[in-house]
Image (spheres, coloured by chain):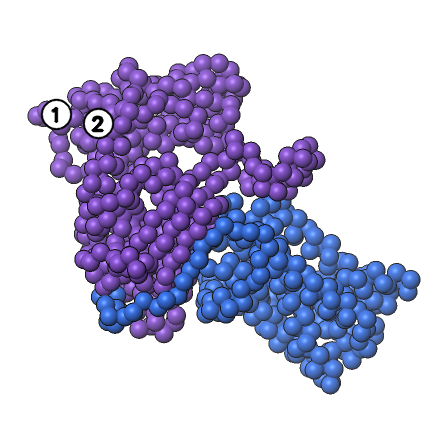
């Protein structure tokens, strides 16, 4: 049986050529496009599975940034009295935690995605870049949920939305590009070098404190700021704050973010393509 | 079943080869530090490795110089001993891993049944898994929706379709997985040992299903150890040995060739038979069954105890070491025995390990033996599969219960106190 039209159908003359792998190869965008449905299915699987057998379900997506915000507000805002450029500290820190929590979750789950799907890598063919990419998709859903919380907070603190909010989609895109680049790179590296499993959580923690999340840029001495602006997350976090809290956007750091993020994405994809051929042998 | 025409090939394979690295930092580098150390210690060697000049000592050709064509609509079997390169061939053809040399062309849509149920998620329902697994295997959502009822019908999971698959019995799990894969609609289907699972009735239905696929004009490449199903499905067969193609022709002749090969004398134990990180420190040298060195097929009577004795040499002293033997039937592991389940010291020098199976334990038939050793709780082991073979004769005595099926008669007796 298989299919009613089977016996008579002419085999399509689609040809698959199998050859030894040579050096760097281009990203087959067409092939990824052909698998777009799989990307969606894997993203949905991640989402469905994540909150299965949890009592609170998707509420967890809110709890994580919300509680971090509360703790930071008490420790850094109340006790350490870190300034917040005149904004309520909880709002100040949450506007930065929103993109950061997304970034940290996306990068760490993308990094683990390939070794977590070893069976998929070993037993079926699919453009493997889909595997880390799909984890970013499900992190984006959590991001949207915690974004709703931010809107509630803005309403509570009586802050009006302004025209600078138009920056939001652009900043989100930039954030996704950076997370995708770092995530894909880490996924490929973790397959060969399991050390990265231990490096990533630790590096993310350092990175968080190297980014103006719990403190404003204004407390960094003028002569040192350039160092902070080299960090692509600085521009993004600053941008997010600017867009909700009516601050001025630091254009220079946004440009740096744009360049670094695009570079990291290209680097990540290239490295991934270079080593992809041996995943099944090494994993 | 018509033979494929030469002018309309479905698969063209030219001098295909696949090399794997053994004990080499090139691929087996498990940590970043090892790679760095290797680079620092032997920069020239590493550079050479990266440049493609490989020390052949560290490599192993799983597939070498394999060429053949498969015509459209042909059903070709691929048989050979364990480690002959069958699975590697399918992995290359499905693009899971690239070849080292040569090339292959496949015309039309390719699907593979390498391991059914890949990507099944235990927490998700049967329904969700059908869509997930279907998408992984390359079906579109409308296509899956259209075939959904047929898939569920064939799998016979009925009312459990909305239950998470972690609550399925293993039989239901396998049936659903096979059913999804069997409803793919490819031009070329690559199948590896998928019928080795499930109960007898389901196996029969599965073979029937594959026969339908074949009759529908699809091209099938079928890897199996089960000669019965190869005979049922294939007209033509390819025999692989040591990564090379040694026979290509009618299925019956190929199976005869394979059976001959299985009873050819082995060259005793040698290093190449073993895998694992300890292969350069522990060496198995001789395997005796009932006091005789195994050479070719060893014959034992069911009334005899089967005493498996292996001798070897260790270059180092290893604490908590355990040597084990596994018995296989048609590629399926029946049991394993250990000489020291908790582990004892293995001293430098020669060692002998003896393990015994009681009489009337195995039913008549041919069995293969694997031996290995491991350090308890460490990632240190070596293991060789198919190192010897023996046949239990059809001389069964009255009074010993002989069931008409399965390889094991009964497990060792228990004790009762009253």
Q: Is mark 1 on a helix, strand or loop?
A: loop
Q: Residue at x 62, y 42 (%)?
A: B51
Report the chain holding disc 1.
B
Asked whether the beta carbons under mark 1 and mark 2 sit within 8 Å of each other, the answer is no
Q: Residues within 10 Å of mark 2 (few under 14, many from 20)?
A: some
State which quadrant residue B117 falls in. Answer: bottom left
Q: Which residue is drawn at 58% across and 38% down?
A: B53
Q: Position of residue B67 (x, y in %)?
A: 37, 46
Give me the chain that's blue.
A
> Is A283 left, or right, of B368 in this rendering?
right
> Is A200 left, or right, of B199 in this rendering?
right
Report the chain holding disc 2.
B
Residue furthest out toward the front: B7
Q: Position of residue B155 (x, y in %)?
A: 26, 60
Q: Position of residue A219 (x, y in %)?
A: 87, 65
Please name the color used to draw chain B: purple
State which quadrant residue A16 falls in. Answer: bottom left
* Number of residue marks: 2
Q: Is residue A114 visible?
A: yes
Residue furthest out toward the left: B398
Q: Which residue is drawn at 25% across and 29% down?
A: B263
**Nearer the observer, B46 or B321:** B46
Q: Is residue B194 visible?
A: no
User: Is B175 located above or below residue B284 in the figure?
Assistant: below
Q: Where is residue A184 in the image (x, y as percent from the top left)?
A: 60, 58
List the residue tagged with mark 1. Answer: B395
Disc ID at residue B391 = 2
Q: Residues within 10 Å of mark 1 (few under 14, many from 20)?
A: few
**Nearer the observer, B150 or B170:** B150
Q: Which residue is drawn at 58% across and 46% down?
A: A192
User: Is A22 located above or below residue A151 in the figure?
Assistant: above
Q: What element carries label 2?
A: strand
């Amino acid at each position: 049986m298989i299919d009613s039209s089977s016996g008579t159908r002419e085999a399509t003359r689609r040809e698959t050529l199998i050859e030894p792998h040579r050096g760097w190869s281009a990203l087959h965008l067409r092939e990824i496009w052909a698998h777009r449905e799989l990307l969606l299915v894997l993203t949905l699987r991640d989402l469905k599975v994540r909150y299965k057998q949890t009592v609170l379900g998707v509420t967890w997506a809110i709890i994580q940034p919300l509680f971090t915000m509360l703790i930071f507000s008490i420790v850094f805002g109340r006790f350490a009295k870190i300034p917040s450029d005149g904004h309520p500290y909880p709002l100040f820190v949450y506007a930065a935690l929103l993109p950061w929590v997304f970034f940290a979750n996306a990068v760490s789950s993308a990094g683990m995605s390939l070794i977590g799907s070893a069976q998929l890598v070993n037993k079926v063919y699919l453009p493997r870049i889909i595997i880390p990419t799909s984890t970013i998709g499900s992190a984006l859903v959590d991001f949207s949920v915690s974004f709703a919380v931010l809107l509630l907070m803005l309403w509570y603190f009586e802050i009006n939305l302004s025209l600078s909010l138009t920056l939001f989609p652009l900043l989100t895109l930039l954030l996704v590009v950076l997370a995708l680049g770092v995530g894909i790179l880490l996924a490929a590296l973790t397959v060969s070098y399991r050390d990265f499993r231990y490096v990533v959580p630790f590096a993310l923690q350092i990175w968080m404190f190297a980014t103006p999340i719990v403190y404003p840029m204004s407390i960094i001495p003028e002569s040192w700021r350039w160092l902070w602006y080299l960090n692509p997350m600085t521009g993004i976090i600053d941008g997010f704050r600017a867009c909700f809290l009516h601050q001025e956007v630091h254009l220079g750091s946004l440009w740096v973010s744009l360049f670094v993020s695009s570079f990291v994405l290209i680097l990540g994809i290239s490295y991934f393509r270079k080593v992809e051929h041996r995943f099944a042998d090494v994993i | 079943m018509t033979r494929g025409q030469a002018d309309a090939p479905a698969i063209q394979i030219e001098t295909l080869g696949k090399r794997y690295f053994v004990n080499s930092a090139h691929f087996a580098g498990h940590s970043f530090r090892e790679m760095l150390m290797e680079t620092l210690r032997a920069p020239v060697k590493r550079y050479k490795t990266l440049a493609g000049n490989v020390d052949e000592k560290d490599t192993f050709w799983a597939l070498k110089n394999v060429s053949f064509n498969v015509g459209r609509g042909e059903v070709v079997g691929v048989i050979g001993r364990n480690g002959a390169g069958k699975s590697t061939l399918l992995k290359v053809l499905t693009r899971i891993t690239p070849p080292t040399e040569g090339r292959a062309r496949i015309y039309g849509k390719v699907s593979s049944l390498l391991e059914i149920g890949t990507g099944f998620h235990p927490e998700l329902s049967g329904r969700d898994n059908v869509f997930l697994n279907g998408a992984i295997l390359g079906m579109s959502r409308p296509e899956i929706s259209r075939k959904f009822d047929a898939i569920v019908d064939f799998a016979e999971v009925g009312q459990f379709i909305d239950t998470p698959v972690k609550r399925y019995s293993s039989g239901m799990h396998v049936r659903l997985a096979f059913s999804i894969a069997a409803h793919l609609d490819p031009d070329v289907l690559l199948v590896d040992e998928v019928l080795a699972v499930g109960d007898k009735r389901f196996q029969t239905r599965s073979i029937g299903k594959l026969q339908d696929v074949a009759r529908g004009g699809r091209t099938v490449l079928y890897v199996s150890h089960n000669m019965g199903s190869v005979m049922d499905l294939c007209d033509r067969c390819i025999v692989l040995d040591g990564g090379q193609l040694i026979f290509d022709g009618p299925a019956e002749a190929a199976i005869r060739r394979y059976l001959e090969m299985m009873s050819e004398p082995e060259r005793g134990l040698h290093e190449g038979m073993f895998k694992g990180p300890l292969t350069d420190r522990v060496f198995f040298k001789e395997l005796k069954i009932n006091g005789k060195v195994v050479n070719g097929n060893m014959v034992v009577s069911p009334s005899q105890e089967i005493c498996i004795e292996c001798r070897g040499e260790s270059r180092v002293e290893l604490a908590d070491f355990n040597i084990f033997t596994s018995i296989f039937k048609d590629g399926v592991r029946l049991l394993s025995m250990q000489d020291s389940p908790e582990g004892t010291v293995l001293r430098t020098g020669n060692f002998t390990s003896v393990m015994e199976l009681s009489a009337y334990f195995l039913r008549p038939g041919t069995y293969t033996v694997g031996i290995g050793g491991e350090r308890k709780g460490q990632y240190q082991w070596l293991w060789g599969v198919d190192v010897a073979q023996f046949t239990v004769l059809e001389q069964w005595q009255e009074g010993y219960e002989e069931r008409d099926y399965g390889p094991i008669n009964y497990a060792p007796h228990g004790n009762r106190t009253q």
